[in-house]
Image: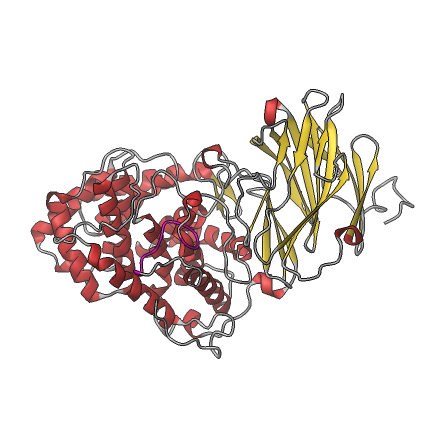
Amino acid sequence: MHLPPPDPALSPRTGYTRAHWEAAADALLAAVEPYATEDRALYHLPGDRESWSGRLSDGLEGYARTLLIAAFRRDETALERYADGLAAGVGGVWPRIEDRSQPLVEAASIALALRLTRPLLWDRLDDGVRQRAAAWLGDALTAEPWPCNWELFPVTVGGFLYAVDWEPDTARKAVDRGLERIERWYVGDGWYTDGEGRAFDYYNGWAMHLYPVLHAWLADDPRLLDLYGGRLSRHLADYARLFGGDGAPLHQGRSLTYRFATTVPLWLGALTGHTPLPPGETRRLASGALKYFLERGAVDERGLLTLGWHGPDPAVLQGYSGPASPYWASKGFLGLLLPPEHEVWTARETPGPVERADAVTPIAAPNWLVQSTRSDGLVRLHNHGSEDVRYDPYYTRLAYSTVTAPASSYDNSVIVGDDPSRTGIEPLGVGDGWVASRHTAGGGARVTSVVLVRGAAEVRAHLVTGAAPGTPVRVTGWAAEAEVRADAVPVVGLDEALTGVTGDAGGLFVALVRLTAEPDPVPLEEVVSVRVEGADGIHVRWSEGPGVRLRITDGAVVSPDLVPVGTNPGDAGADA
């Protein structure tokens, strides 16, 4: 992909400016055009893989998702081509929108694009085409979505159809119904689960925030924009911390092949005025993510986005992933709706959170602890609250980072017997430098876990109960990647291979763990030490700062606020 020269004066961190985003959008649009059918209603991108929805639906997906690029770019020439495809598609080519069918997803992209470009596309269509298009989209108003982020697709279609006065009562009801349904998944502090349970991932940004906030903004509804925009702003305070110094998003959750769609909430906050981030930081984080993927093989020699993360990678795909699925990355071009003179484009880039200082950030809603280090730009996520067993291992591991991917060897796990499962995750709290949870492991055993961190170092303690005496237990740390060092040192109950066995009452297993890109880090044993106190207590001492004592029982961590040793009532005189 040919991009303009970097601009180190305006963008000292990434070199990217609005011109780079425009060039990337134009290149992606040009690359897909040869794969359009003659009537332009379908885009059949190359590849051996079909989604479980089939070739016709995949072709519609290719049309709808690439249309978003043209809409955000406001490319009139491209929009003329998509207008031809729209006329053919609603003339009988596209599959009908039915309950829980993939066309419902694509209808939302089409409706959003039509709403954003109404004077350039919709208003120029023949009346007959508009009527057929509205009728095709109208099925989305009554189609039953899957009970997750799909609830927002009828909202998006309904918002557009209401704006063009097509069955406004039905359209309004679809909007109200979808917005009402997502309320049950809002858990506070700007975080939603993606449906029932505790599925926390990037769908928070590129779906759960995107569609309500854009609808409120486009409808010019101050009440809704205050509600959803306020949630977005709060979310961004956490979200900005999930990008590494190299621009990488965390490698966690499903649909990771959407890649730089992870930039959506950043742009959305700037577009609607609901963000705590300075303009230069917003662009730095967003441009960093785009650059990260473009420089690592996300686009192949034909200029097409591949099914994967860097290059092709089947590990990040789901059954619904077809050849055009990666083009939900088109949402990342939302920032092009901001005019060139907007301060997000004119401000000088400023550092992201990971570049400013080491930080340990508790995020209560998902029960996550985010650990970042300035020296190497690494971000690590300690997951003690997100779970979706359908998509293991991208939800259920104990930790994720911006430089590692879940490994087949079951990194970041507690393996009881020969079963690496982690189900029924129960959050036990998160605070300053710590996070805890309990889960069900192999054979029905229970594992209560607490992680304490400082700098790049981690203390991971796991109490295993409910397993037969003599059951082997293996604790794993990070899966090392190129140019990254992964350390794991056994401390309590483990041998050098990080394995041990349970006793009559179970067992306490503690290890020191670290993931770092430092070329010559201080040995872990010089950074932190752990002393056992009784059957279920430990005393953690850091080389810098106060130590802490805690007691781990089945499903509880006593002294959950991890008050420094020596300040607890009755603990006077204890060493720190």
**Main secondary structure type of the part rendered in magenta:** loop
Image point 47% across, 68% down: which residue?
A: 279
Q: Which quadrant of the figure has residue 264?
A: bottom left
**Closer to the camera in the image, 386 or 33:** 33
Question: Does residue 477 show up?
Answer: yes
Image x and y of residue 280, in percent = 49, 69
> On the rendered image, what quadrant is the N terminus found in?
bottom left
Left or right relative to 207: residue 71? left
Rendering coords of residue 127 (x, y %): 8, 53
Tell me, yes or no, whether the highlighted magenta stretch contains residue 310.
Answer: yes
Which corner quadrant of the image does residue 273 belong to?
bottom left
In the rendered image, residue 563, in percent from the top left (x then y), is placed at: 77, 45
Highlighted magenta segment, given as a residue range: 302-311
Image coords of residue 313 (percent x, y) = 42, 48
Q: Is residue 240 left or right of residue 514?
A: left
Observer able to see residue 122: no
- Residue at (65% x, 30% y) in the render: 447
Q: Indicate whether residue 109 is drawn in magenta.
A: no
